[in-house]
Amino acid sequence: MFFFSKCLLFLATTAIGINFLSASARALVSVTPLPRLTDDEFNNLIRTGQFSELFVTESRIGNNATNGTQEISVQDPRNSLLPVTQGQRQWTSDQPVNFRLEYTGSTVNYTVGDQLLSSNAFSGSASDIFLRTRAENNSRLNLMNLLLNGQSLPSLMSSGANISDIDYLRLGNLPSSFTLTGDSTFSWLGEPPRNSQLAYQIKVGNSASRSVPEPAKLAGLLLIGILGIGFGKRQKEIVKP
Protein backbone atom coordinates (compact mmCIF):
# COMPACT_ATOMS: atom_id res chain seq x y z
CA MET A 1 0.00 0.00 0.00
CA PHE A 2 2.85 2.33 0.83
CA PHE A 3 4.37 1.64 -2.59
CA PHE A 4 1.16 2.63 -4.40
CA SER A 5 0.82 5.80 -2.31
CA LYS A 6 4.33 6.77 -3.35
CA CYS A 7 3.46 5.96 -6.96
CA LEU A 8 0.38 8.16 -6.91
CA LEU A 9 2.35 11.02 -5.36
CA PHE A 10 5.08 10.61 -7.97
CA LEU A 11 2.50 10.48 -10.76
CA ALA A 12 0.77 13.66 -9.59
CA THR A 13 4.08 15.51 -9.33
CA THR A 14 5.19 14.26 -12.74
CA ALA A 15 1.88 15.18 -14.38
CA ILE A 16 2.22 18.73 -13.08
CA GLY A 17 5.76 18.88 -14.44
CA ILE A 18 4.70 17.50 -17.82
CA ASN A 19 1.90 20.06 -18.09
CA PHE A 20 4.29 22.86 -17.14
CA LEU A 21 6.91 21.80 -19.67
CA SER A 22 4.29 21.29 -22.36
CA ALA A 23 2.81 24.74 -21.76
CA SER A 24 6.29 26.26 -21.85
CA ALA A 25 7.10 24.46 -25.10
CA ARG A 26 3.87 25.68 -26.69
CA ALA A 27 4.38 29.26 -25.53
CA LEU A 28 7.02 30.23 -28.09
CA VAL A 29 6.46 30.10 -31.82
CA SER A 30 9.36 28.64 -33.81
CA VAL A 31 10.80 30.97 -36.45
CA THR A 32 12.61 29.82 -39.61
CA PRO A 33 13.74 32.36 -42.24
CA LEU A 34 13.66 30.77 -45.70
CA PRO A 35 15.21 33.36 -48.05
CA ARG A 36 16.21 30.72 -50.62
CA LEU A 37 12.88 28.87 -50.74
CA THR A 38 11.31 29.14 -54.20
CA ASP A 39 7.63 29.01 -55.10
CA ASP A 40 8.21 25.66 -56.81
CA GLU A 41 9.75 24.27 -53.63
CA PHE A 42 6.89 25.60 -51.51
CA ASN A 43 4.32 24.13 -53.89
CA ASN A 44 6.18 20.83 -53.68
CA LEU A 45 5.62 20.84 -49.89
CA ILE A 46 1.90 20.92 -50.67
CA ARG A 47 2.06 18.31 -53.44
CA THR A 48 3.97 15.86 -51.22
CA GLY A 49 1.69 16.38 -48.22
CA GLN A 50 4.33 18.03 -46.05
CA PHE A 51 2.16 21.14 -45.71
CA SER A 52 -1.53 21.81 -46.33
CA GLU A 53 -3.00 25.30 -46.57
CA LEU A 54 -6.06 26.06 -44.45
CA PHE A 55 -6.54 29.64 -45.68
CA VAL A 56 -4.46 32.41 -47.24
CA THR A 57 -4.67 36.17 -46.86
CA GLU A 58 -3.19 38.50 -49.45
CA SER A 59 -2.41 42.19 -49.74
CA ARG A 60 -1.22 43.25 -53.20
CA ILE A 61 -0.78 46.25 -55.43
CA GLY A 62 -3.66 45.11 -57.68
CA ASN A 63 -4.58 48.04 -59.91
CA ASN A 64 -4.02 50.40 -56.96
CA ALA A 65 -7.53 51.82 -57.21
CA THR A 66 -10.84 51.64 -55.39
CA ASN A 67 -12.48 49.91 -58.34
CA GLY A 68 -11.59 46.96 -60.54
CA THR A 69 -9.45 44.10 -59.23
CA GLN A 70 -9.06 43.51 -55.49
CA GLU A 71 -6.08 44.59 -53.40
CA ILE A 72 -6.81 42.61 -50.19
CA SER A 73 -8.49 39.23 -49.79
CA VAL A 74 -9.00 36.05 -47.78
CA GLN A 75 -8.56 33.07 -50.10
CA ASP A 76 -9.72 29.44 -50.08
CA PRO A 77 -7.01 26.88 -51.05
CA ARG A 78 -9.74 24.28 -51.60
CA ASN A 79 -11.14 26.42 -54.41
CA SER A 80 -8.05 27.44 -56.41
CA LEU A 81 -7.30 30.28 -53.95
CA LEU A 82 -10.36 32.23 -55.01
CA PRO A 83 -11.33 34.94 -52.50
CA VAL A 84 -14.11 34.23 -50.02
CA THR A 85 -14.03 37.91 -49.11
CA GLN A 86 -12.12 40.81 -50.65
CA GLY A 87 -11.63 44.56 -50.63
CA GLN A 88 -9.94 47.42 -52.46
CA ARG A 89 -7.53 50.13 -51.43
CA GLN A 90 -5.05 52.60 -52.83
CA TRP A 91 -1.45 52.25 -51.68
CA THR A 92 1.01 55.11 -51.30
CA SER A 93 4.65 54.34 -52.05
CA ASP A 94 6.90 54.17 -48.95
CA GLN A 95 3.96 54.61 -46.56
CA PRO A 96 3.65 51.93 -43.83
CA VAL A 97 0.22 50.36 -43.39
CA ASN A 98 -0.61 48.29 -40.30
CA PHE A 99 -2.25 44.89 -40.61
CA ARG A 100 -3.75 42.41 -38.19
CA LEU A 101 -4.68 38.75 -38.70
CA GLU A 102 -6.74 37.03 -36.01
CA TYR A 103 -7.70 33.35 -36.13
CA THR A 104 -9.86 31.80 -33.42
CA GLY A 105 -10.15 28.31 -34.86
CA SER A 106 -13.42 29.16 -36.58
CA THR A 107 -13.20 32.84 -37.56
CA VAL A 108 -10.67 34.73 -39.68
CA ASN A 109 -10.41 38.50 -39.17
CA TYR A 110 -7.97 40.25 -41.50
CA THR A 111 -7.56 44.00 -41.05
CA VAL A 112 -5.47 46.19 -43.35
CA GLY A 113 -5.37 49.82 -42.33
CA ASP A 114 -8.93 50.52 -41.23
CA GLN A 115 -10.55 47.88 -43.47
CA LEU A 116 -11.70 44.56 -41.96
CA LEU A 117 -12.32 41.35 -43.90
CA SER A 118 -14.00 38.59 -41.87
CA SER A 119 -14.87 35.00 -42.73
CA ASN A 120 -16.23 31.88 -41.03
CA ALA A 121 -15.44 29.66 -44.02
CA PHE A 122 -12.52 27.95 -42.26
CA SER A 123 -12.20 25.96 -39.04
CA GLY A 124 -9.80 23.68 -37.23
CA SER A 125 -6.35 24.00 -35.79
CA ALA A 126 -3.27 25.33 -37.59
CA SER A 127 0.35 24.49 -36.83
CA ASP A 128 2.31 26.70 -39.22
CA ILE A 129 2.34 29.99 -41.11
CA PHE A 130 4.35 30.74 -44.23
CA LEU A 131 4.78 34.48 -44.76
CA ARG A 132 5.64 35.24 -48.40
CA THR A 133 6.72 38.53 -49.95
CA ARG A 134 7.17 39.27 -53.65
CA ALA A 135 8.51 42.32 -55.50
CA GLU A 136 9.46 43.04 -59.10
CA ASN A 137 9.47 45.86 -61.66
CA ASN A 138 11.60 48.24 -59.53
CA SER A 139 9.61 47.72 -56.35
CA ARG A 140 10.16 46.68 -52.74
CA LEU A 141 7.92 45.14 -50.08
CA ASN A 142 8.83 45.24 -46.40
CA LEU A 143 7.04 43.52 -43.50
CA MET A 144 8.24 44.87 -40.16
CA ASN A 145 7.28 45.21 -36.49
CA LEU A 146 5.89 41.68 -36.65
CA LEU A 147 4.36 40.20 -33.50
CA LEU A 148 2.53 36.93 -32.95
CA ASN A 149 0.66 36.88 -29.64
CA GLY A 150 3.22 39.41 -28.41
CA GLN A 151 6.28 37.46 -29.55
CA SER A 152 8.63 39.56 -31.67
CA LEU A 153 9.44 38.19 -35.13
CA PRO A 154 12.10 39.14 -37.69
CA SER A 155 11.26 41.43 -40.59
CA LEU A 156 10.78 40.11 -44.12
CA MET A 157 11.64 42.03 -47.28
CA SER A 158 11.70 41.49 -51.05
CA SER A 159 13.25 43.90 -53.54
CA GLY A 160 13.06 43.27 -57.28
CA ALA A 161 14.02 45.08 -60.46
CA ASN A 162 13.48 43.21 -63.74
CA ILE A 163 12.89 39.83 -62.11
CA SER A 164 10.86 38.73 -59.10
CA ASP A 165 12.41 38.59 -55.66
CA ILE A 166 10.50 36.17 -53.43
CA ASP A 167 11.17 35.51 -49.74
CA TYR A 168 9.57 33.27 -47.12
CA LEU A 169 9.43 33.19 -43.33
CA ARG A 170 8.03 30.12 -41.57
CA LEU A 171 6.36 30.19 -38.16
CA GLY A 172 5.69 26.90 -36.37
CA ASN A 173 4.22 25.61 -33.11
CA LEU A 174 1.20 27.89 -33.40
CA PRO A 175 -1.24 28.18 -30.47
CA SER A 176 -4.87 27.19 -31.05
CA SER A 177 -5.79 30.82 -31.59
CA PHE A 178 -3.43 33.62 -32.53
CA THR A 179 -3.08 37.25 -33.53
CA LEU A 180 -0.40 38.32 -36.00
CA THR A 181 0.27 42.04 -36.35
CA GLY A 182 2.75 44.17 -38.23
CA ASP A 183 3.35 46.94 -40.74
CA SER A 184 3.70 46.57 -44.50
CA THR A 185 5.37 49.07 -46.81
CA PHE A 186 4.87 48.99 -50.57
CA SER A 187 7.52 50.97 -52.48
CA TRP A 188 8.07 51.50 -56.21
CA LEU A 189 9.80 53.73 -58.74
CA GLY A 190 7.93 55.14 -61.73
CA GLU A 191 4.83 53.23 -62.74
CA PRO A 192 3.63 50.87 -59.99
CA PRO A 193 3.66 47.12 -60.61
CA ARG A 194 0.39 45.33 -61.31
CA ASN A 195 -1.70 42.70 -59.54
CA SER A 196 0.49 40.35 -57.45
CA GLN A 197 3.85 41.59 -58.76
CA LEU A 198 4.07 43.48 -55.46
CA ALA A 199 2.34 41.53 -52.71
CA TYR A 200 2.52 39.56 -49.49
CA GLN A 201 0.60 36.47 -48.45
CA ILE A 202 0.02 34.88 -45.06
CA LYS A 203 -0.39 31.15 -45.68
CA VAL A 204 -1.93 29.43 -42.65
CA GLY A 205 -2.05 25.64 -42.46
CA ASN A 206 -0.71 22.42 -41.02
CA SER A 207 2.56 20.55 -41.38
CA ALA A 208 2.80 16.77 -41.49
CA SER A 209 5.43 16.58 -38.74
CA ARG A 210 4.84 14.01 -36.03
CA SER A 211 2.74 15.40 -33.20
CA VAL A 212 3.89 15.22 -29.57
CA PRO A 213 1.57 13.27 -27.21
CA GLU A 214 -0.60 15.43 -24.98
CA PRO A 215 0.32 15.61 -21.27
CA ALA A 216 -2.71 13.50 -20.28
CA LYS A 217 -1.60 10.72 -22.63
CA LEU A 218 1.95 10.86 -21.27
CA ALA A 219 0.64 10.68 -17.72
CA GLY A 220 -1.57 7.72 -18.63
CA LEU A 221 1.34 5.82 -20.13
CA LEU A 222 3.42 6.63 -17.06
CA LEU A 223 0.68 5.31 -14.76
CA ILE A 224 0.46 2.04 -16.70
CA GLY A 225 4.21 1.59 -16.38
CA ILE A 226 4.25 2.34 -12.66
CA LEU A 227 1.32 0.03 -11.91
CA GLY A 228 2.99 -2.71 -13.94
CA ILE A 229 6.15 -2.40 -11.87
CA GLY A 230 4.13 -2.33 -8.67
CA PHE A 231 2.12 -5.41 -9.65
CA GLY A 232 5.29 -7.33 -10.41
CA LYS A 233 6.80 -6.32 -7.06
CA ARG A 234 3.62 -7.36 -5.22
CA GLN A 235 3.58 -10.74 -6.95
CA LYS A 236 7.16 -11.39 -5.87
CA GLU A 237 6.25 -10.57 -2.27
CA ILE A 238 3.31 -13.00 -2.36
CA VAL A 239 5.29 -15.97 -3.68
CA LYS A 240 8.28 -15.31 -1.45
CA PRO A 241 8.90 -18.46 0.71
Image: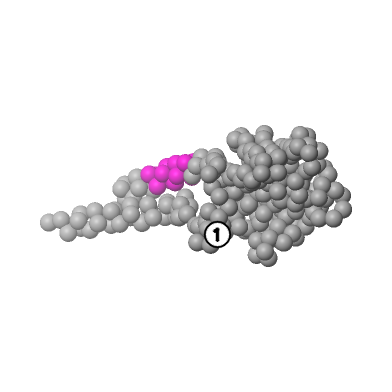
- Name the one closer to the observer, 16 or 43: 43
Give the number of callouts: 1
Location of residue 82 by image quarter: bottom right
x, y (%) of residue 189?
76, 37
- Name the one closer to the observer, 21 or 71: 71
The C terminus is located in which quarter? bottom left
Q: For the point 42% across and 42% down, which residue is it?
A: 13
**Is 157 inside the magenta-drawn segment?**
no
Q: For the point 47% across and 41% down, which residue is it?
A: 21
- Name the one closer to the observer, 8 or 121: 121
x, y (%) of residue 48?
50, 61
x, y (%) of residue 194?
76, 49
Q: Is residue 180 visible?
A: no
> What residue is shown with label 1?
46
Q: For the point 78% across and 43% down, which residue is it?
A: 192
Tell me: 211 left or right of 221.
right
**Is 15 inside the magenta-drawn segment?**
yes
x, y (%) of residue 1?
32, 50
Write down the region rendered in magenta.
9-21
Secondary structure under the numbered disc 1 in the rendered image: helix
